[in-house]
Amino acid sequence: MLQDKITAGIRDFFGDPGLAVSYNVPPDKEMGDFSTAVCMPFAKTLRKAPFLIAEELAEHLSRCSLPYISAVEVTKPGYVNFRVDYPLYARDLIERILKEGDRFGNSEAAGKNILVKHTNVNPNKAMHIGH
């Protein structure tokens, strides 16, 4: 849900409603809680350094209403990093749990089937694409 709102802000910035946005956990916690490198592919098209594009995107996202995001920061070469306001998120989550009680986390699957897949690797052999 949180990343959906960020993705909507990114798509708005680039003017592409179908833009695929992926998120990663930065290698260093000091960089933020999660990040995106979505600006990198646009450097050639926009004829700008990815870092400059990331700065403009971060400024745009800072003006968007992003719940539970305390900071949007940029690191080289053009990553946009996000910091989560965990105390606020935890407070709202606890309020929701208390309000919904036993219903919290339940789904009205509405007749839909859910398929859960997992790997079943033989620990005595090398893992391969067939797993």
Image (cartoon, rainbow, N blue to C red):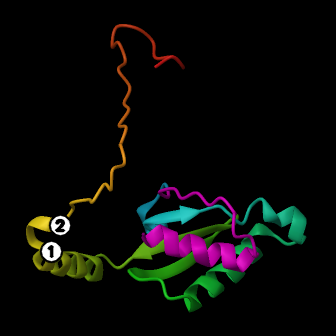
Relative vertical location of residue 101 with respect to residue 106 in this rendering, above or below: below
Relative vertical location of residue 115 with respect to residue 101 in this rendering, above or below: above
Residue range of the region highlighted in magenta in the rendering: 1-26
Tell me if residue 56 is in the magenta stretch: no
Residue at the spot of label 1? 100
Query: Residue 125: image x %, image y %?
Result: 40, 8
Q: Residue at 35% across / 43% down in the picture?
A: 114
Relative vertical location of residue 39 with respect to residue 110 in this rendering, above or below: below
- Residue type beneath disc 2: Phe
Q: Nearer the viewer, residue 30 or 60?
A: 60
Under tag 1, what secondary structure? Answer: helix
- Residue 55 figure quarter: bottom right
Density class for disc 1 (Cα within 10 Å; few <14, some 14-19, many ≥20) is few
- Residue 96 figure quarter: bottom left
Query: Residue 8: image x %, image y %?
Result: 59, 74
Q: Nearer the viewer, residue 92 or 27?
A: 92
- Residue type beneath disc 1: Glu
Residue at the spot of label 2? 104
Whether pointer 2 and pointer 1 mark residues with C-beta atoms closer than 8 Å, the reply is yes
